[in-house]
Amino acid sequence: MDSDIDPRQTLPAQQAVRRAVRKHLAELPADGLVLVACSGGPDSLALAKAVAAESSRAASTWRAGAIVIDHGLQAESAEVAQRAAHHCRSFGLDPVEVIRTDIALDHPGGGGPEAIARDARREALLEAADRHAASAIYVAHTRDDQAETVLLRLSRGSGARSLSAMAPITGIWHRPLLALDRATVHASLRDLVSWADPHNADRRFARVRVRLDALPALVEALGSGVVDGLARSAELLRDDADALDAIAERVWLSSRVAPQAGAFDEEHDRVIELEVAALIDAHRAVRTRVLRRACLEVGAPAAAITFDHVRSIEALISDWRGQGPLDLPGSLRVSRECGRLRFDRSDPLGSTPRA
């Protein structure tokens, strides 16, 4: 733990963390099981301790357990996982389970180490939640994590939905500490020794460079309110994205042509047609959402359909000059004929333009 934390901060910090957890527990139906995803680091241990304390209150009808994921990426990872499990049991959490996930960091197309580990962790946690019939999985992301995520996505040219970053609740996933800064969360655990993941100091990872270099530089240049500002921007953008998605849903329903018999087959997947007349008056931000959705519903890989691809499809509406069909990733073909946009999957067209 941080050695420079003032002991006088500990009790207020513990109270703040417990209030945050209590607020999230109140959002869930009674008589369920909460599983805390615990790595053994200070954030997740602070969360586990607060969840255990809140679930043991006389008024609580909740049970709480913990899942510790061991990726085996460090020599001492098994020992770290068992120590984290021991702490969770000492808090009173039950069940507590350690799950080993052996991941191949060099798996083709798997993304970087962070993405591969994250996907393996999510899958293991979801399987554990299903096995234990859990109502929620609690993860320990803080306001600082939120600010880092916004900066990372901003650097990649992301849209409002992506820049809205992490929501407090997404399905089974709950982030009770998202409104608290990392310093407060760490202060709440001052009396307990936690594990420091060496990956969190490894500048080979983009998030570590943001945490150790970029964000401190912004704070020095613009003031301490930068973290709050980035997190607040994420919340505002989430509201905007929700509103645009709701409008896009209405446009999707009004523009989609009812599928004809034979519009689906195992070889070519789905065929979707959209009426151009129902799209042309929609705002571009709405229209592009509808077009991207059509690509995905036909079966195009989400990661393969970029901003430029969607923009090229949108030009079939906003800049229509009789251009031919587009040949896009995932054998996706988009064409405009007789006032309709047609999305289907077939063999690449060879001579058609690629966006």
Image (tube, grey):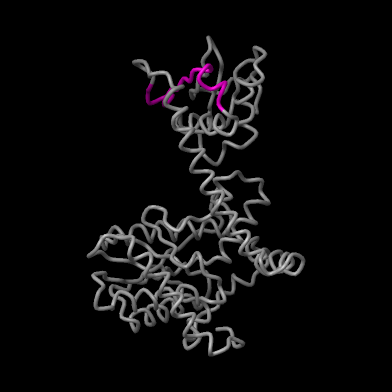
Answer with left or right where residue 59 lies relative to residue 299.
left
Residue 27 picture location, percent across and down: 34, 60
Answer with left or right where residue 71 lies relative to residue 163.
left
User: Which residue is pictured at 53% across the width and 73% down the height?
Assistant: 74
Say which of 192 and 177 sits in front.
Answer: 177
Residue 127 picture location, percent across and down: 33, 58
What is the number of callouts on the image? 0
User: Is residue 262 depicted above or below 144 in this figure?
Assistant: above
User: Which residue is pictured at 38% across the width and 60% down the height?
Assistant: 124
User: Which residue is pictured at 63% across the width and 60% down the height?
Assistant: 229
Say which of 10 and 110 sits in front.
Answer: 10
- Which quadrant of the figure contains the C terminus? top right
Image-quadrant location for residue 297: top left
- Which quadrant of the figure contains the N terminus? bottom right
| Residue 266, magenta (yes or no) | yes
Residues in magenta, as a range: 264-282
Image-quadrant location for residue 100: bottom left
Residue 36 picture location, percent across and down: 38, 69
User: Is residue 112 depicted above or below 242 in this figure?
Assistant: below
Say which of 264 and 168 sits in front.
Answer: 168
| Residue 342, magenta (yes or no) | no
User: Is residue 80 depicted above or below 335 in this figure?
Assistant: below
